[in-house]
Image (tube, rainbow, N blue to C red):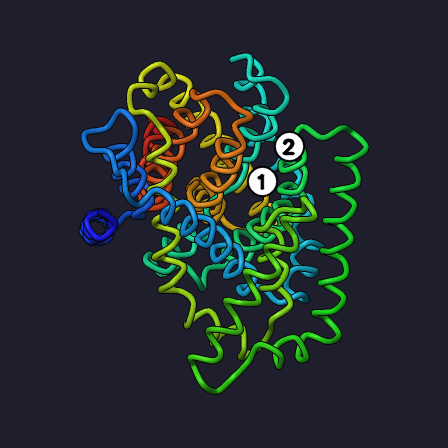
Amino acid sequence: MVAHETALALIQLGAVFFGLGLLGRLAERVGMSPIPLYLIGGLVFGQGGLIQLGYVDDFIHLASEIGVVLLLLLLGLEYSASELVNGMRKSWAAGVVDLVLNATPGIVVALWLGWGMTGAVAMAGVTYISSSGIVAKVLGDLGRLGNRETPTILSILVFEDLVMAAYLPVLTAVLAGVGFLAGLKTLGIALAAVTIVLVVALRYGRYVSMIVDSEVREIFLLKLLGAALLVAGVASSLQVSAAVGAFLLGIAISDTTAHNATKLLEPLRDLFAALFFVLFGLSTDPRSIPPVLGWAIALAVVTTLAKLATGWWAAKRAGASRYGRARTGAALVAHGEFSIVIAGLAVAAGAVPAEFAALATTYVLLMAVLGPIAARIVEPVLGLLGRRRLTAARS
């Protein structure tokens, strides 16, 4: 019986991996992020879908947790402590505007739907944070990494990622239903940890890198992955959030060690993160999507306009041209992995209604597709509007 179940589990898991590969190939062919397709794949195989996976649930749950850890670890590896500090100094005003304009719609909708403060805090994060992975890929694909407005885009993304380090512990405390004082304690621990890690990374980052570094790939991978899981586990036990722990470890690793670690971990991150997106889709009943589709479209429209306004204002302050301002706003539209991480934490805690997962899934599907499209068409659209305005002025 055990051998039979093992065989079925291997068949199901193999089908999931192969199916994800096909979806990823399709996304690459059409020039979009694979995240929406992974979510759709989860919807197809989850509750209320065409086929239900009954033998690999435990593995996918654990793998998805590892996926979140790796997502945040590699996010931390992208930045040095000095880049974070400088980014905060340059972009704090634009970051605050971004936070207010894009978190507010999520809060309003959650309260309107009667999801209470817990749902409002969670939905605020879903609508607020852009997908740095999708943004970076789009900028690279369009050859805009050297553009004048790109530092403005990256500085806003840095601010968002630092906000995540403070936001996730707050969300964890809210989802756990702890009191106000306990929530303040959790936030205090998180802010203290961020401060300590930044100081350590600025002054002693090379020693942290030396501890995990190795010239042997196998040893390097084992130490790096082991350290990430250990730190994430300790952070989770302190109710600070495993994701924050992994993010802080990534910040503390610097220079060539960080670069080598990114190259080594990227395939693992892509694998486990894909399972995380599938798991979120599995937990969402497709039949719950139509009732919230209107709300998802409304949120997509409002937050797209908010991101465009944020980028335009920030790039204008940096002296960018009209096209540069438009490109900045359009680049920030895409939402993806971190919105799903936030929604996944809320759903796993059982602190939000079933409609929350449906709304978050539908919203991210829309924004992950809309973001790259907006980045590609913003210049032709702006040029067309300019020509029409010029023609109208002449006539």
Q: Residue at x 34, y 42 (%)?
A: 57
- Tag count: 2
Whether residue 303 is visible, yes or no, is yes
361 over 59 or under it: above or below:
above
Between marks 1 and 2 in the image, the one whose residue lies nearer the viewer: 2
Q: Position of residue 177 (x, y in %)?
A: 67, 28
What secondary structure is marked by label 1? helix
Q: Residue at x 69, y 47 (%)?
A: 92
Q: Position of residue 215 (x, y in %)?
A: 48, 87
Q: Position of residue 27 (x, y in %)?
A: 23, 49
The residue type indicated by label 2 comes to Ala
The residue type indicated by label 1 comes to Trp
The reply to whether callout 1 and callout 2 are in contact (CB within 8 Å) is no
20 over 354 or under it: above or below:
below
Q: Residue at x 40, y 30 (%)?
A: 363
Give the residue at mark 1.
313
Instruction: Please give left or right for residue 107 compared with residue 294 in the image.
Output: right
Whether residue 378 is visible, yes or no, is no
Q: Nearer the viewer, residue 378 or 174?
A: 174
Give the residue at mark 2.
176
Instruction: Please give left or right for residue 167 compared with residue 302 in the image.
Output: right
Q: Residue at x 62, y 81 (%)?
A: 210
What secondary structure is marked by label 2? helix
Spatial CA distance of label 1 from label 2 is 37 Å
Q: Which mark is residue 243?
A: none
